[in-house]
Image: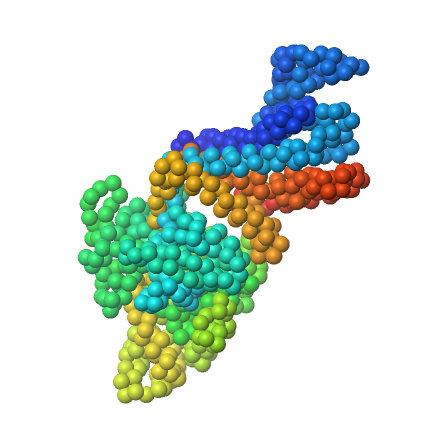
Amino acid sequence: MFDIPGPLGTFVNFLTIALGFGSIIFIHELGHFVAAKWAGIRVLAFSIGFGNVLCSYRKGMGFTKGSSEPQYRKLMYGQSQDAHPEVSPTEYRLSMLPLGGYVKMLGQEDLNVDATSDAPDSYQNCAVGKRMVVICAGVVMNMIMAAVLFIIVFMVGLKSLPAQIGFVPEGSPAANAVASNDQIIGGLLRGDRIRSINSKAVYSFEDILPEVAMAPKNTPVSIMIERDGVDVEFLATPVKDEQSGLLGIGISPAISTTLKAAPEGTRPIWDMGSAQFGLDGLEPGDRIISVNGQSINSPFDMIDIAKQTNGNTITIQVERQGTKILIEHTIEQVPALQTDLVQVGEQVQGTRHLLGLTGVLMVNPYATQEETKQGLEPGDIFAKIANVQYPSMSEGIVAIRAHKGQSLDLVVLRKDDIGQYQRVKLTVEVTPQGTVGFYQATTATHTNLISKPGVFQRASENEGGAEDGKTESVELPASTLIEYPGSRITKVGDYPTRTLRDVHIGLLIAADMAYQEGKESFEIPVTMQLPLPVQPDGSIPTTTADWSLTRADIDAVRELGWTLPGSTGLVTMFEYAQIIDKADGPIDAVSRGMNKSRRVMMQTYITFLRLFQGSVQVKHLKGPVGIAHLGTQIASQGWVWVLFFMALISINLAVINFLPLPIVDGGQFLMLIYEWIRGKPVPIVFQNVVTMGGLVMIVMMFLYVTFNDVKALFGL
């Protein structure tokens, strides 16, 4: 927050968040205190902080070191409350831990339901309606505080993601959205600016998720967008996102053309990524302003322009941060590969292939030796992991994870000084998380080494031909070609191949004549070196097989065309587009503040709903340690972000406090409703049972989330 480097800065940021969190609790308790005074309930103590009392003040007795409670009791012993009207029954305390506070009322203690009183100004003898006000006052104060903080934030302005679409996946609800204007064909597009969802205005991309997630299931949402200066309404039916468990339409935020910063200690990783994507030589913060002379607004524009050049080298113009000097940089294009999903344990992940041909898992060759561990080196190719020969990336990950916390035998292929691959045996230790310590890559773009073709997952379609959000297993043509994992494809037809990308070119050349003749099937000769021992005469076992392909297979390869190194992964090198989300004036700031409070409150309720539905797990929640860690990171972004974070916490505290659970305000409110209806309070025995049950549940939840927070904090 104060831009102090090192541990001191972290401590200052933590202290800032701790005091901010304490102020939220203090405001909550202040609400109870003011309401209790209004209701005529005797307030015994109002404390800033918890624990031992450092000093206190009581009207009629002045300031006291520690608590004045013993002196007050001695003074009032055996006398009525009115015996000393100059002495207040309320003690104002400053306690040792200034992280919030508490209110102690006569006849009301959250953890001791037997602490009742027959006094006329006790909590029990106050009208039920007034007690409801007292119970609700803390939550109301938190909501008011959040609204005020949001108003301040939007008056000053907050860096946010613009409400602009950066990417629309094929088959997603956004891609299948229908415009109210019949003249507009197709769904939502990259670059569309979203103005409102179901008539509720959105100002940033962060506003979109809760509005879509709150939509009724299987019901289209109205999305008003601006395209080319014209407002158009689209209808899209959200579907459940498999990762978040929330309803969504599948869009991603807009991405700028500015290369990401490299935080301290991450520059080697940044350099590895830039080299992998053909951006070596550029610097963090560089902004690409044009490609082949055409202005661009997104790295996806760069990919689109590259596709139009049919494999030719592209030239990008770069503006270096802090200067107006333009730098020209060239990028060599590469033949494109296909992308599909493969099963990795209980999850699916994307992988690149060509008609089912996949590369072998390897250590990223652009990594430095300092970024690999346990004897592995950049460029090492995994010839064997446990009993898995020449694993693909997905097979390798599964094999490593199967040995969590154990030793694992590996065999890698490593280039020697003359460029020949030598087999190297290693034994490594697998972490409890199932990792060894290297940056992943595959041989697809580096050598002609091929893994065993696997089973891929593709989006399935319903009867209408539209994708239904599910996947189905498909077997691709490579399953009939590769018999031995670790084979090297050296030729396709007469075309020599050094990488899997070269196979792309070789297939098109070999099939060109038959393709022009209109044939529907092809027999393309493929020459392969087999992973067998070298023959006595020194030759490498080689075989030639005719690969049976259809016109549809060749069409699929032909449609891939050329692309930039890394393909769409290139966009991960760029920052998200940002705007300053600022209200137009005080009135607009108030409206924005109230609107944001409503959204955050609804999103919190959604989270609890998903907990019961099972799509969000308790391990995903954050406790005090996790909140403090996150808050410390946010505090480093500036005081506006601190206020925004405090507003979020204040709203969440209000929601949690008013859940219908024992010992929190919501549970107390339910008991008051019972008392109002029946004319008598909830039986003490029942109150004791639910209070202890609620206490046990909350303590167990606290310990569980704190345990997960600590594990995450230390990377365990």
Residue 4 versus residue 677: which sits nearer the camera? 677
Q: Residue at x 41, y 30 (%)?
A: 2
Q: Residue at x 70, y 41 (%)?
A: 673
Q: Residue at x 59, y 46 (%)?
A: 708
Residue 548 versus residue 662: which sits nearer the camera? 662
> Is 195 displayed left or right of 599 in the figure?
left
Residue 79 versus residue 165: which sits nearer the camera? 79
Counting from the top left corner in percent of width and height, residue 649 is at: 53, 39
> Is 188 displayed left or right of 83 in the figure?
left
Colour style of the rendered protein structure: rainbow
Q: Is residue 232 visible?
A: yes
Q: On the rendered image, what quadrant is the N terminus found in?
A: top left
Q: Residue at x 36, y 69 (%)?
A: 337
Counting from the top left corner in percent of width and height, residue 283 is at: 29, 47
430 over 19 or under it: above or below: below
Counting from the top left corner in percent of width and height, residue 68 is at: 68, 16
